[in-house]
Image (cartoon, rainbow, N blue to C red):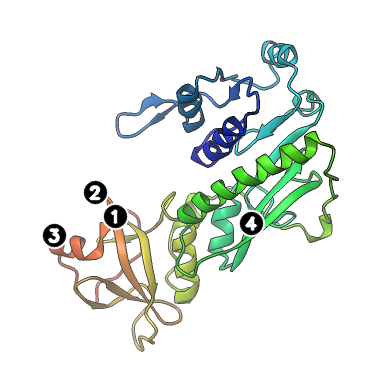
Amino acid sequence: MGTPEFAVPSFEALCDAGHSVVAAVTQADRPRGRGRTPKPPPVKEAARRRGVEVWQPLRLRDEAFLERLRAAAPDLIAVVAYGKILPPAVIELPRLGCVNVHASLLPAYRGAAPINRAVMNGERRTGVTTMLMDEGMDTGPVLLQREVDIGEEETAGELARRLAALGAKLLCETVGALASGGLKPVPQDHSRATYAPMLTREESRIDWSLPARVIADRVRGLSPRPGAFTTLGGRILKIHAGRTGGREAKGAAPGEIVAVTDDAIEVATGEGTYLITRLQAENRKCMDTSEFLRGRKVKAGERLGGPQG
């Protein structure tokens, strides 16, 4: 069971490992792109390429879906970023349990946005965990874990690709060990739990009064989606990449542009400056700042932030 791009490596790894994959359970097709045309989720596309049957139940509690699942009698259900809470009727069905791949070192960063939050918080290490699911939110006993470093300038999108690949390997290792009876689940220490709730639009708005280091981490954690944003001339400007400027901007208010070079816009923050190197203007594609500056004049003294356009 899985839905987004993050789940595809796990699905393909299970197929490549020779497991009998009965079906790929994924969420319904959703409108995407400018035309808002319904598009299949990445796991559905991967399943079609592999010739695996696709199930897209509207509700996991629907009796028709549960009957179909019971008839399939899976030994194990692998769950990777499915996007909905599984009811007990599903969790308790497979003989070996429901195994979830979670993109954090549980019990840290339980919830929907562990990768984004870890990067936004300036963490230097994270990882992936496989666990046996229970009815709680990422509270089940841990099966296996692997740690990785987070690069100093790595974005959430880049980290997600690495963790998806690592999670796929860990899932195959977990399934093999469970099938052979060589894996003992370890209960989580719930007193050490931290949480990674879904991102809100307001969190994506850059607060220029924060230190430049904090802003840099948040921009990385929100890139490429949903993207950190500010405003310039009353219009939305997404910031996809940048770095701390390494100097103070005495006398400049947070959000004030203090310098413009060929390839960066330097902005005053609450502590130090931040250099914008990649951005996206409203209704435009993402581009390097150098390309943006060839089409739009930006001057020192202009102010980022304020009311949205």
Q: Is tag 4's residue or tag 2's residue first in the polypeptide sequence?
A: 4
SS under mark 1:
strand
Q: Is tag 4's residue or tag 1's residue first in the polypeptide sequence?
A: 4
Q: Which residue is mark 4?
A: 127
What amino acid type is highlighted by mark number 4? Gly
The location of residue 217, given as percent across then percent down, is 49, 67
Q: Residues within 10 Å of mark 2 (few under 14, many from 20)?
A: few
SS under mark 4:
strand
Q: Is residue 107 above or below residue 247?
A: above
Q: Which residue is mark 1?
A: 280
Q: Is tag 3's residue or tag 2's residue first in the polypeptide sequence?
A: 2
What amino acid type is highlighted by mark number 2? Arg
Q: Which residue is mark 2?
A: 284
> Disc 4 vs disc 1: which is toward the camera?
4
The location of residue 132, given as percent across then percent down, is 78, 40
What amino acid type is highlighted by mark number 1? Gln
Q: Which residue is mark 3?
A: 295
Contact between labelled residues 1 and 4, with CB atoms less than 8 Å apart? no
SS under mark 3:
helix
Q: Nearer the viewer, residue 277 or 142?
A: 142
Q: Is tag 4's residue or tag 3's residue first in the polypeptide sequence?
A: 4
Residue at mark 4 to residue at mark 1: CA–CA distance: 30 Å
SS under mark 2:
loop
Q: Is 247 left or right of 285, judged from the image as shown?
A: right
* Residue at point 58%, 24% (across, down): 24
Q: Nearer the viewer, residue 306 or 292?
A: 292
Q: Nearer the viewer, residue 291 or 72?
A: 72
* Residue at point 44%, 62% (across, down): 219
